[in-house]
Amino acid sequence: MGTASAKCPFGVAVHSHGKLGALPRSVEFSSSGFPQNVNVSSISLYPSSASVTSSKERISQIGSLPDIDDFYWEKVPTPILDVVENPIHLKNLSSKELKQLADEIRSELSSMLCMSDTQISLKASLAVVELTVAIHHVFHAPVDKILWDVGEQTYAHKVLTGRRSLMHTMRQKNGLSGFTSRSESAYDAFGAAHGCNSVSAGLGMAVARDLKGKRERVVAVISNGTTMAGQVYEAMSNVGYLDSNMVVILNDSRHSLHPKIEEGPKTSINAMSSTLSRLQSSISFRKFREVAKGVTKRIGGGMHELAAKVDEYARGMMGPAGSTLFEELGLYYIGPVDGNNIDDLISVLQEVASLDSMGPVLVHVITEENRREEDNQKSEMEYKHQDGSRNFDSLPYAIQRRTYSDCFVEALVIETEKDKDIVAHAVTFAAGLSCGGLKPFCIIPSAFLQRAYDQVVHDVDQQKIPVRFIITSAGLVGSDGPKQSGAFDITFMSCLPNMIVMAPSDEIELAHMVATAAKVDDQPVCFRYPSSAIVTSDNFIHIGSPIEIGKGRVLVEGKDVALLGYGSMVQNCLKAHSLLAKLGIDVTVADARFCKPLDIKLLRQLCQHHSFLITVEEGSIGGFGSHVAQFIALDGQLDGRIKWRPIVLPDNYIEHASPREQLDMAGLTGHHIAATALSLLGPNPRSP
């Protein structure tokens, strides 16, 4: 094979046998720069603008690549996966076939999802391929209920449950959800996205099963990240108290439970741990344990407690530190089990599934997120643009536009350099920090703030404690869909009596609001920003200055229609202004900045000098527009000539799609705003 040019500015997706490691941007396919043990089976090239400026130059680079005949372009065979249409087809597969199936699924996910047009994280799903295969081999979904607590673990589950042919549509408009969804498949027993709800929901299903006299199994798979959420422990405590028959599988990738401190790769599960796990899960061990406790109960006195302590001590000696935590919550602990060893997993799960009245069990499995097979592993690597596109207009090596989060961090760093009392933490702890004289910034996604709302009300707002809430991922979130969307924070934060509620329209305003929040020291304050890229493409770090509380601004003066935008929707109001200006319509565009307190002076000015007022927000009913309507109604403005129309998110959940598609579905684009203005102006909208 001839030598290829070492300077091709292409994004590369290579699927090969063996380990690739890090493929350099400058690739010489037959030189030392490319791994010598790699037999390339397929290659895809995505043009980049790193050093090529014209389409002609891009095309000319292709001539320097190796001849097409030097590569194997066939799809990697997946003979077992090809005949698996649903989990029932796993029942009669041998151990060897199940292992091959796991390899094929991992290969399928690596290639298929990396070719998807959206940004998808594979680590969690690749880590649980063997666990997923074992679960569906042992249990009988959808009769048995399998619950997953986060969507990122479920891609192998989706492949095995009849959705393989649609995996390339993941997180796209009208495609598969990135999470489990009851409306998508009967195999998805419960919807999940935030994590930490599977044990609670599973317990509810188990109790309902018992009351109806049914016998199906309930299995809840939780991740190590979930163990940081209090709801999990509340649910486990309730599981132990009710003693319902269900299985909790703790998928531990060793991030939260016990961070690695050893050098090198994560410690593997040794043979002794595997043996003990099998012993602890065996029928004889379980029956011996229960018989021993039953005998001591009949003996009476302190013998029952003594037997329990002896059992706890023995298990503590055999098992890992902390296993008795789950026992104290009332779950029988089994583990640790090698989560990437199908034989061990099946052995343990079969023993667990064979007992009809064993009560709640927790199976602790250790998985490897960065797992790579020693042999026949299809390594994959891809350089992709942030939004997943691979066309000439959106190129992998192009300089990425900064996001609002990037600008927020920069602005917060500037403020912390000025004020050493600024710290970051979660809701109630932040309230305590504030009481102790610090200036806490509580940074939390809008969808997660919903779960902490009681703390916001009781621990912060009622006590008027100056905590600064930075609400990220506000509004629509593209391919993450409705489960992660931030549609409701304007509504539920602006109804709190002591809360200052604001939103920046661009990155400059964001810096100003960070500075403003840092200066507020007598009440709580919040502001929201989206997950999207910032308005401008420059890399300038903006230094913010405090703005007057409750003070908006007019960006463009007009007289026919007033567009009052809140937050990021100000930019779409400006787009609508440009469209309407072409029709000769004179439009005012104002940036509200604050939902609470409202700029009363600005509102009166807009109402008195215009015939129509349109409020625009990327939030649900009951938010900014409702506050405006409340004021102008009580102030008598609606008694005059002003007509008001709100543009908000529709009263339904917007499914996953690209950000542009979601805004179009929600009716929040510049064209939609302009159309609303035209409908108010009537058939002869042109100004005299």
Image (cartoon, rainbow, N blue to C red):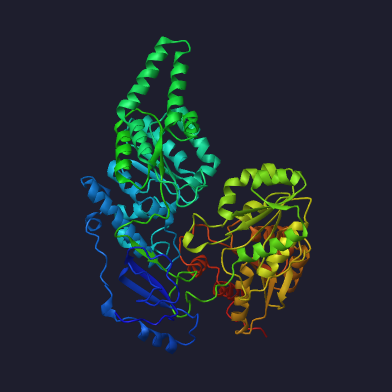
Position of residue 21 measured from the top left corner of the image (x, y, whole percent): 41, 64
Q: Which corner quadrant holds the N terminus?
A: bottom left
Residue at 24% x, 54% y is 84
Number of numbered markers: 0
| Quadrant in the picture for residue 110 | bottom left
Compared with 399, 417 (above or below) is above
Residue at 65% x, 58% y is 626
User: Could you say which is closer to the camera, residue 317 or residue 558?
Assistant: 317
Position of residue 447 measured from the top left corner of the image (x, y, whole percent): 55, 53
Position of residue 300 measured from the top left corner of the image (x, y, whole percent): 44, 10
The reply, left or right, for residue 108 in relation to residue 497 is: left
- Viewer can see residue 139: no
User: Could you say which is closer to the camera, residue 106 or residue 465?
Assistant: 106
Position of residue 175 measured from the top left corner of the image (x, y, whole percent): 39, 62
Q: Which corner quadrant holds the C terminus?
A: bottom right
Residue at 38% x, 63% y is 113
Compared with 384, 326 (above or below) is above
User: Could you say which is closer to the camera, residue 246 or residue 402?
Assistant: 402
- Viewer can see residue 286: yes
Q: Residue furthest front?
A: 32
Compared with 232, 687 (above or below) is below
Residue at 77% x, 66% y is 545
